[in-house]
Image (cartoon, grey):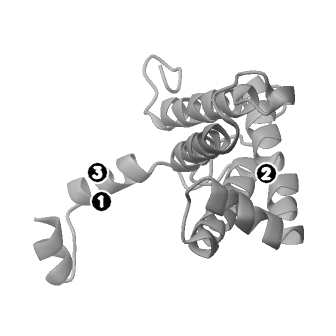
Amino acid sequence: MLIASAAAGGSSSSETSTWRGLIGPTVLPDRFVLTNGMNIVRIQAGLFYAPHIYQKLSGIDTTLAFFTKAGLSPAPMFLSLALVFESLALIGLTFGLFTRWIGLVSAGCMAVAGYAMIQTRGMNWYWAKGGIEYLVFWGIVSLVIAIDAWQRGRPSVGGRAGL
């Protein structure tokens, strides 16, 4: 129906509403109101990507060797994907853009990073010993950010948005 409607040059308001409901707000409402703790967590989670992107770009040979050792090959393709998705997470989380989806992208990045750590260093929890503790925490935070964005995007019920 949607494809036929789009091919005919238009779409019904219910179809447009369905797509907008799925995509969610492009810009998260009140995204820089720092009295909302979730905004602080989201912004911090986004900014945490900056040093990781920088590390990958400043040590490309080392990063490619790590990706190869982790079994992520071809390593140049996985490096490119990591840079694209981490850059999207940096921008999207920091500025509250497409947050319900970017939160999921961020969680996916952490899942792949956790996999790579286990492949290269074995199963270990403690981060300071090369474990996945930090990656699991960051992944869970990313999922919570996505859930919060989904709740903020719902119509208000009883005068309270997202409830």
SS class, disc 3: helix
Task: Tell me which numbered mark, 1 or 2, is placed earlier along the sequence.
Answer: 1
Q: Residue at x 67, y 41 (%)?
A: 117
Residue that badge 1 annotates: 16
Q: Is residue 71 left or right of residue 90?
A: left
| Marking on residue 18 | 3
CA gap between label 1 and label 3 equals 5 Å
- Amino acid at the residue labelled 2: Tyr
Relative to 43, residue 58 above or below: below
CA gap between label 2 and label 3 equals 32 Å
Q: Is residue 98 visible?
A: yes
Question: Could you tell me residue 42's position as x and y percent?
Answer: 73, 38
Mark 2 nearby-residue class (10 Å; few <14, some 14–19, many ≥20) = many
Marks 1/3 in contact by CB < 8 Å: the verdict is yes
Q: Is residue 32 visible?
A: no
- Amino acid at the residue labelled 3: Thr
Q: Nearer the viewer, residue 70 or 95?
A: 70
Q: Residue at x 59, y 28 (%)?
A: 144
| Marking on residue 49 | 2
Mark 1 nearby-residue class (10 Å; few <14, some 14–19, many ≥20) = few
